[in-house]
Image (tube, helix red, strand yellow):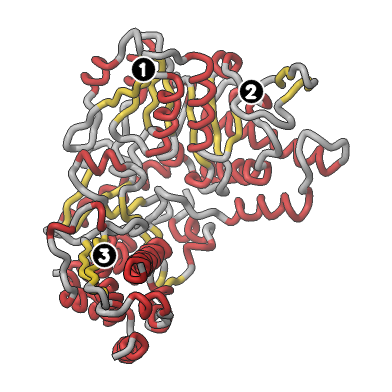
Amino acid sequence: MTINQVQDTIINEFSTFEDWMDKYNFLIDLGKELPLIDQKFKKKDYLIEGCQSKVWLHPEYNGQKITFTADSDALITRGIVTLLIKVLSDRTPDEIISSDLYFIDRIGLRQNLSPTRSNGLLSMIRQIKLYALAFQVRSKK
Amino acid sequence: MKDIAEIRADFPLLNRHVYGRQLVYFDNGATTQKPQCVIDAVNEVYTSYNSNIHRGVHALSDKASEEYEKAREKVRSFINASKREEIIFTSGTTGSINGIAFSFGERFIRPGDEIIISHLEHHANIVPWQMMCERKGAKLRIIPINDAGEILFDEYLKLLSGKTKLVAVTQASNALGTILPVREIISAAHSAKVPVLIDGAQGIQHGVVDVTAMDCDFYVFSGHKIYGPTGIGVMYGKEEWLSDLPPYQGGGDMVENVTFEKTTYNELPFKFEAGTMNFAGAIGLGSALDYVLSIGRENIKARERELLHYATEKLSEIKELKIFGSSDKKISVVSFLLNDIHQYDTGMILDKMGIAVRTGTHCAQPVMDRFGIDGTVRASLCFYNTKEEIDILGTGIEKVITMFA
């Protein structure tokens, strides 16, 4: 599936929820599917700045695609990271850099999360794109 | 005393709904809501006499200056300072402490000197002193706390020495609620001829503050935490200290005479009020203090004590809940965690139920470190809150526990 196809699937899934409680329960459950970061990467180098709860994110580049693993100490955040990884993991740097993440607004994450949390989300996206940019530069050398 | 329905009717914001639910506002430690009279007072400034203070020769400027100085008198009387010259308006507690830390540092601090603070301080009463210590080669000493979140008074006495130049402590911990024994702290410091600054950000709104009886040398607080507007605060200092300190900001109104060779400073309190002050905020603060007096500070204290007692009992019934800060002398703050549920997860779900609490370190990271935690959920109550709201919080917490179990 393309990035946009995955986004559309997520939007579809979220559209079935009538109230926010279901949405959050779903996010919490989703967090259980997160490809967990190896303990050895769970250190400051991989901690994302700007998140109120802790988020660790590790990229693995095989020369073609980047695979992300992550973790968070808060369960709702873990659910959100899981969504980002569903959309952006196992993609080429070019795909990640040019992606337009419209699903965040469409599933009501941006308005439903507090500004600080929202900033954390933005920091995660920025970090993912920065990794993609770094790998893109490296592969073109 | 007005009954609770009448009190709540004074605060228009308390009626609002969030996410379709009646708001339960338990973030009063961060900022309080404003009674209509404060909103009206600020509104009146801008609709009927807005004009720069202490400058113009015209009617509006006279009126604005007069109201601003009336507000200063209200503050003086509210904290029982002896002179209006001792009341300086600032932007808030943080602004006040930064100002004093700079001026005091410039005037009195030499390499090797020491400043004492407590382990309970808000970052606003840590960082300005660290900055000053760095500038002057001085050292910060910390009064330790016990597991209940109370300072160890004997350890404080041991820290006091010939090197101590200032003690700066909070009246009450914003993170845990502990009320500090400020009178004893001040009297011990004075025996060693050391002045004391009291951070009143979490003290001024919870009872009678009498700086003369307390005998502190400096007392600072924010307007927005005592039902006044944001962006206005107070720095009280005994005249003997304020006369001796250099100003920390230069500009208009704080000068007596300016030439390119030399400037002489205006008298107190204007020496410390450079530039156009937040006069609308000061006037709004004056109105807030009038309001607090109309309710009665003893009444507020009694009501908040009752709410704290009820909240502590109610929340203690929840077996997954642990309260941080168990001193028997507390302001109406309950800081807690639910087993290993992250404070942000808790805060997020409570928010969706219309309950506003604060989560995180509460700008008091050292306190969190002391307890080996990343943060807490803090419900900070005030006299306009109700037992019914505490019950709603209890239900909300049960819901959180079910969701994250």
Question: Is A91 displayed left or right of A97 in the figure?
Answer: left
**Residue A21 percent location from the top left of the image:** 28, 78
Please tell me how crowded label 2 is: few (under 14), some (14-19), or many (20+) other residues with Cα within 10 Å: many
Looking at the rendered image, the disc whose residue lies closer to the viewer, 3 or 1, is: 1
Q: Mark 1 points at which residue?
A: B114
Q: For residue A31, what is the image quadrant?
A: bottom left
Q: Where is residue B24? Give x, y as percent.
A: 38, 63
Horizontal arrangement in the rendering, residue B130 relative to residue B145 (left or right): right
Q: Name the residue under label 2.
A: B85
- Classify the position of the C terminus of chain B by image quarter: bottom left
Specify the amino acid type for callout 1: Glu
Say which of B32 and B308 sits in front.
B32
What residue do we see at 76% from left, 38% from top? B53
Q: Distance between the residues labelled 1 and 2?
A: 29 Å
Question: What whole-number distance in Å separates the C-alpha atoms at marks 3 and 1?
Answer: 41 Å
The residue singled out by tag 3 in the image is B345
